[in-house]
Image (cartoon, grey):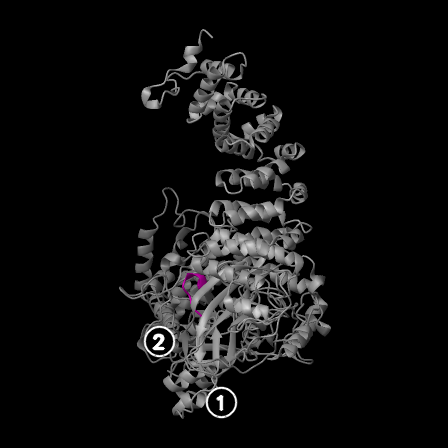
Amino acid sequence: PARLPLFRCAGHPSNGGRPALMAKLDKGTVKELSGVLQSTALPTQARTNAAESILALTKSEQGCAALCSAGALHAIFVVLKERSIPPELLRPACRALCNLYKFDGKLVAVVARLQGGIEALLEAVRDHCASGDQRLLQWLLSALSDVSHTGSNTSVVVKRSGIPLVLRVLLAHLKTEQLVLPCLFVLVNVARTPAHVPLIIHEGGVPAVLAAILAHVNHALVVRTALSLIHALVQADAAAPTFAGDGAFRVLLAAMRAHAGAGDQLDLVRLASTVLWRLYGSRHPMGHLLEAWAQYTPAAGSEAAAASEAGDRDGEAGGATDGGGENTSSAEGADDDAGDADGDALEVADAGTAAAEVPLPRAELILGAPLHLDDEAPEPEPTHVDGPTPACLVARCLVADAERLVHPQGPPGDAEAGAASAEGRALPGYVPHDPPVLYDAHGGARVTGEAACAAAASAAGVQAFPPAAAGSAPAAPLATPLTPPLRFSSAFESGNLRRAIRVREREYDLVLSCDVNTRGHTQWFYFSVQGMEAGQSYKINIVNMLKSDSLFAHGMRPLCYSTTAARETGVGWRRCGRDICYYQNEQPVRPGVFASPALFSSSRKKRAKDKADAATYFTLSFVVTFDHGARAPNSAGTGHRAAVHAASEEETAYICQCYPYPHTRLLDYVGRLQRNPSARARLRVDELCTSLGGLAVPLLTITDMEGGLGLSAEEVRARPVVVVTARVHPGETNASWMMHGVIEALLSDSPVAAELRSWLVFKVVPTLNPDGVVLGNYRCGISGEDLNRNWAEPSPAKHPTIRATKALIAGLAAEGRLLLFCDLHGHSRKKSTFMYGVEPAGKNPGPMRLHEKVFPLILSRLTPHFSFGSCSFKVLKSKETTGRVVVSRSFAVAHSYTLEASFCGPDGPVDDGAPEAHYAIRDLQGLGHAFVEALHTFAQPSHAGYNTALADLEAMYPPKDGAATQGDGSEEEGADGDRDDAPGVRRAVSVRRKVSATSNGNAAKGKKKQSWESDAKKRKGKGSGTAQK
């Protein structure tokens, strides 16, 4: 008592007379404060002053550290355990405890459990829950929510009847936001332990939480916390059905509507959507969106069948089975390889559950694609269109999905909907459940009546999306007939559409086919539409996309082709769609399973870039308006455009991801080139091999042939060779348009092409995966494997095209003639055009440093569509079996590349003042022309262009001090550090000498030829063995 003035610390008037923070802070002072606080013999005012002083100290880290080390926590819990403690003392003690928890939550939680602090807080809440001091009750609940964040502490809360106590406080103060929030926080902590979930439900936690959402539906933090609690509750299968009787569906929908307007609370809307669909799925098992593992059986007696049978005997092949049965080794291995590529394939935990759901989806390869004009709009088509923000669109789409789930017959607040419900009929424009399946690629269903729809769905073994209403009455008859539905089809070459389902009068859910022999790779779409009304807007939802990100989320728009517009205006493919939205939906990848970690193997989970995409699909949603109706006007037309569409006057629209380039178009183009007299002296077409599906794979050789200009066969065979391939991934159609430009430029009469044909030989394989192109696959071939992941050891039974191409390259490399290899691709996630190369392995690249960057730098200076900054030369371990890496490392080729063109367009405007636009066909062909022009600079006999680019690279990437390392000095992942690069150096120098020699006059040919032969003999004697290996 004598030292009491020390602790009172008479406050300054500006501080309201409150105790001020002491200037001198030491451990002894803190201990004295703690002693005064817990001493019941002292007056209440003295203890309150000590509590206020401790609270002031908690506002700094130095003070918190001193309090934690000097027994202040113990003193606070002693105060909390007292009976009939005055509120003026309890309030600063609780506030100080909350501040100390922010400083060291783990320590506070442990001390609270060991010293009975949790029981003391519960008793204090019980004593003050009915009092009018809401401020004190708020701090008590806040302290309780802080110290109960660990599993052991929540067990104490449960044992001391904390759940009913917190729920009682929640319902008693339901309108007070400051008290509802800490109550919800405590319940969230308790629900983290699955064993406690039934206790919360048993004590009436479900209606209490739903009531809290309704009471504070516009308060984002309260709704988000309550949704987190419900999400934890519904993870238990037995708990989810209990929500049905509490109006949970409508409460969650109300929360989604309240926060979907501006799109700034997208995470809240997504959480509510996840909870709603989880509740729905617990009562209505989800339908099967995926097709079964589709097996393709080659025709009996064909080469593919013989190869497949031989492969089966050798234990290698798995592309065919009898009767459409499963082949687990083939399919799982394919998905594993493809998963390394983009993370969009699936590994199936138990293959037997979906082995034989439906018959073979494709009994044969459909050859014959629709005839389309290549004419385009004269002006570039912009990527982004004016409209809502992407976040707002996603929120709206999630709400629309939820509304369709909860109110399949129309919104209950709508007057017309109320009248329709009273009369026992459905609201016009709303399709009763189950929605009709209008098209099924497997069964060929094309139906309009409800009975026929149900029969088709039953025959196909499918359920609609969504399969039923959430607790609503059975479907009522329609008030007025719906308009005739659209007619969909993908029964043509390269088409991809598995199923079309009508969910609203002018809204359709579409399901894509997986790549044959896989359960994934749903990305490429290409289908036709008929029966549309002119000027009407239709909403299209592609509901089973697998990639976690897409260019459709960054401004890309789908393509649409109108037969009437092409006939009347001569314009073919145009960008279409508005309100384009790419978002994660709530349809589980495996039916009836929600985010189960047992779905996927550990290797899949390690590779996944986004763990969420392992559980549910993604939806591409857009609204398209058709300018022409079902019956086009009678227009005669003239010339080629009239011949293209003379077969039918009915309007047909085609919608696809990227400009299609079917295999039959390639064969027609190659045939026309062969019939061109001017191309005979510079083009030879051979058959590289036969694909697994029995299709011929053309090999184009482009150069000045022997005899055409007085050249001998030996002179032609001495030229260096450039190998260019494309369409190893069949859905990357933009690669074929680039290849079209490459072939067109090489066969032209330009001086650049003429010089290149006199210097080099070009081996061109336009399509490495013709089977996948014809089938409408996105990434794989018939065997279900990504061919670009099988270059290391290609199987003659499953990868004949890769094996033949690699054998061709190996022969050229053994002769020392391989100058450059490039594989053309498309990219679905990045904008612009760029290259992937292979930097030299090891920490000391030696004389080949930066040589792999020369060609990309030259190309970037010839076209604004190519971005050198987007290029990458690192080699990840998952990419070591791709074409560019295998060619570079197996045959010591420094210039081995993958050329990637975006499905969308350049990253930003190409010209000043112009909007960001999509790539048109002319742009993709122009990239092929620029590729040829870059080869001309790259292969100049004088080496001027090559040396200039190399000098610029030396300035851009100076070597580090003390070592001649690669630009950034880092070693690539998975690189073979002790591989000898000397053969690669000798080969590059040798091949470049050959390029130099071919341009000199006839007088010097003999001497130069001797130098080539001498150099070849030296190289063969010294390094050919290592190179062949």
Q: Position of residue 306 (x, y in %)?
A: 68, 76
99 relative position to 599: left or right:
left
Read off the magenta span. Answer: 551-558
Q: Determine whether 109 is above or below 576 in the image.
A: above
Q: Determine whether 901 is above or below 74 in the image.
A: below
Among the two numbered marks 1 and 2 on one chain, the one whose residue lies closer to the N terminus: 1
Q: Position of residue 200 (x, y in %)?
A: 64, 42
Q: Nearer the viewer, residue 704 or 828?
A: 828
Kindly identify the amino acid type of the residue bearing the numbered disc 1: Ser
Q: Position of residue 1007 (x, y in %)?
A: 36, 70
Label 2 crowd (10 A; few <14 / some 14-19 / many >=20): many
Mark identifier at residue 753: 2
State the residue position of label 1.
Answer: 648
Q: Determine whether 73 is above or below 411 in the image.
A: above
Q: Position of residue 1008 (x, y in %)?
A: 37, 70
Q: Is residue 552 inside the magenta stretch?
A: yes
